[in-house]
Amino acid sequence: MIRYIARRVLYLVPVWLGISLLAFSLALLAPGDPVRQTLQQSGIDAPSAEQVAAMRRELGLDRPPPVRYVLWLGDALRGDLGRSFRTGEPVLRSLTDRFPRTAQLALTGVVLGLLMALPLGILAALYRERTLDHVSRLGALVGASIPSFWLAYLLIMFFAVQLRLLPVAGSTTPQHMVLPALTRAIGAGATLTRLTRSAMLEELSREYVRTARSKGLAERAVVVGHALRNALVAIVTVTGIRLAALLGGAVIVETIFAWPGIGKYVVDSISARDYPTIQGFVLFAGTIVLFINLAVDLAYVWLDPRVRLGGTVGGH
């Protein structure tokens, strides 16, 4: 087990370095001059060449890109992602201050999605090609097909405008989280419902399920204790992917509902060409995704020990 975990952690190192290189390259490839942008935001409409050169030296932008990358990477390893051109605040502090809000929204959306998906997917598999199966499949198809921005506006029109039950924007009360979390939950739940159904159908058709039933085990024990446990390998994979995406910042949803998370903060930074913040966000979000992937790998070991022994379950 320890060797398995150590091997997985070592795999993360080159991937993380690749993410850091990508994050740093964004500033080199992006159009515009961040120095002039920063000077103009400070009130200098037409900065002189001397002012631009002085700012470049101050920000360290007069050095060759490889040198800047090494210095930036060293600072990042020490927890320093630079300072925002727009606000002057440390980027890491700005991201960590807003991350709990994004995490709260993401976790709530994923948990609600699972609470919808698991029962519906299991029942659809047990009652295949019957009314419940057709209804759940149609609902999952619709939920997965609706763009998040359109779904958000539909929920706003119904619950906020027509029924006047819930607030639209902000985060000061628990009611403010209902609509954005429901928007994320419907999309995640639709995908997970279809996946749960297909995974359960595959497991229920296997020989070990027929053997368990022939031994007289209760149907609940067969479905939950045997079939669902093996189907969870695929479900955990997709749940981890969805959670990683949401923790990276649900940009559209957070912007629509004015939710003060990472997504909205990065949108404002992109508009202002705040390159240190954009670089820091890419590295921050990439690191979160890597840790979630590590957690999913460890969940595989718990769900199916064959993974640790070198099997190929779940693509590993």
Image (cartoon, grey):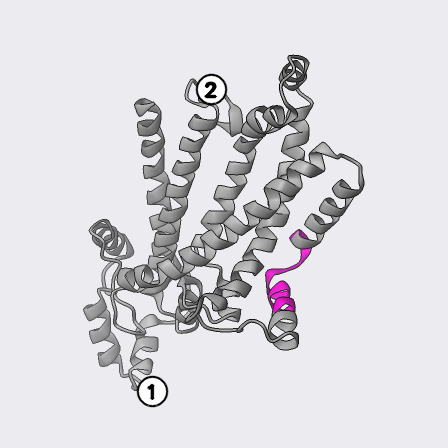
Position above or below: 193 against 222: below
**Residue 129, x across and y down, in percent:** 80, 36
Magenta residues span 144-155
Would residue 13 be found to the left or right of residue 239 on screen? Answer: left
Q: Any mark on residue 45, and which?
A: 1
Earlier in the chain: of badge 2 and badge 1, it is 1
Q: Any mark on residue 306, and which?
A: 2
Residue 34 placement: quadrant? bottom left
Q: Is residue 4 magenta?
A: no
Name the secondary structure under disc 1: loop
Residue 157 placement: quadrant? bottom right
Crowd tier of the residue under label 1, counting other residues whose Cα lies within 10 Å: few below 14, some 14–19, many 20 or above: few
Q: Residue at x 62, y 70 (%)?
A: 159
Q: Amino acid at mark 1?
A: Asp
Task: Quote the CA–CA distance across marks 2 and 1.
Answer: 64 Å
Q: Is residue 145 magenta?
A: yes
Closer to the observer: label 2 or label 1? 2
Position above or below: 42 against 168: below
**Residue 61, x across and y down, in percent:** 25, 65
- Most frequent secondary structure within the magenta stretch: helix
**Residue 156, x across and y down, in percent:** 60, 71
Q: Residue at x 25, y 65 (%)?
A: 90
